[in-house]
Amino acid sequence: KNETNEQKIAQMENEINLLRKQNFQKQSEEIAKLTQYLAKTKKDQAQLKKEKEKNQTLEVRIVELGQTLEKLREQFKEAISKHEGIEKKLQYLQKQPEEIVKLTQYLEKKDQVQLKKEKE
C-alpha cells in the first residue's frame, strides 16, 4: 500500500512537472507574441510619427504656397492695372495725330480766312 501511495505521489509529481513545463511553454509563447506585438507597435508608432512630421511639413508648404499665390495674384492685378493704364495712354497717343491734323486744318482755314480779309 505504501508503494502504491509512493507511485501515486510520483505520478502526481510527474503530472505537476508536465503541467509546469506546458505552462512555461505557453507563457514563453505568449511572451514571444507580446514581444512581436510590442515591436510592431513601436514600428507603427515610429511610422505614424514620420507621417505626422511629413504632414506638418506639407501643411507648412501649403501655407507658403498659398501666400506665394496671393502675392502673385496681387502682382497680376498690378500688371493688369498698369497694362490698362498703358493701353489708355496708347489710345490717347493714337488719337493725338488726329487732333494735330484737325488743329492744323483749323489753323490753315483760319489763315485763309485772314488772308482773304487782308486782301479785301
Image: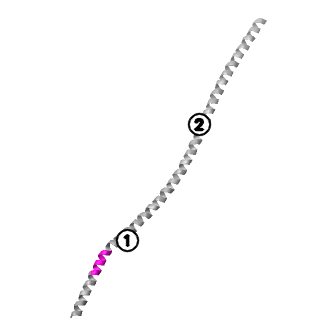
Residue located at (55% from left, 51% from top): 60
Residue located at (66% from left, 27% from top): 31
Where residue 84 appears, as percent x and y from the top left, is 39, 67
Mark toward the start of the polypeptide (2 vs 1):
2
Viewer-proximal residue among 78 and 60: 78
Quarter where residue 109 is shown:
bottom left
Residue 44 tag number: 2
Residue 89 tag number: 1
Q: Is residue 98 magenta?
A: yes
Q: Is residue 9 magenta?
A: no
Apparent side of residue 75 relative to residue 99 in the rendered image (left or right): right
In the figure, 119 relative to 6: above or below? below
Which residue, as the protein is rendered here, is positioned at the far right? 2
- Say which quadrant the N terminus sits in: top right
Q: Magenta part mainly helix, strand or loop?
A: helix
Residue located at (30% from left, 78% from top): 100
Residue 35 tag number: none
What is the three-letter code of the residue carrying label 1?
Answer: Lys
Apparent side of residue 84 relative to residue 63 in the rendered image (left or right): left
Look at the image and give the residue range highlighted in magenta.
96-104
* Dot 1 crowding, Cα within 10 Å, few <14, some 14–19, many 20+: few
Q: Nearer the viewer, mark 2 or mark 1?
A: 1
Apparent side of residue 67 relative to residue 4 in the rendered image (left or right): left
Apparent side of residue 92 relative to residue 55 in the rendered image (left or right): left
Mark 2–mark 1 Cα distance, whole angstroms, equals 66 Å
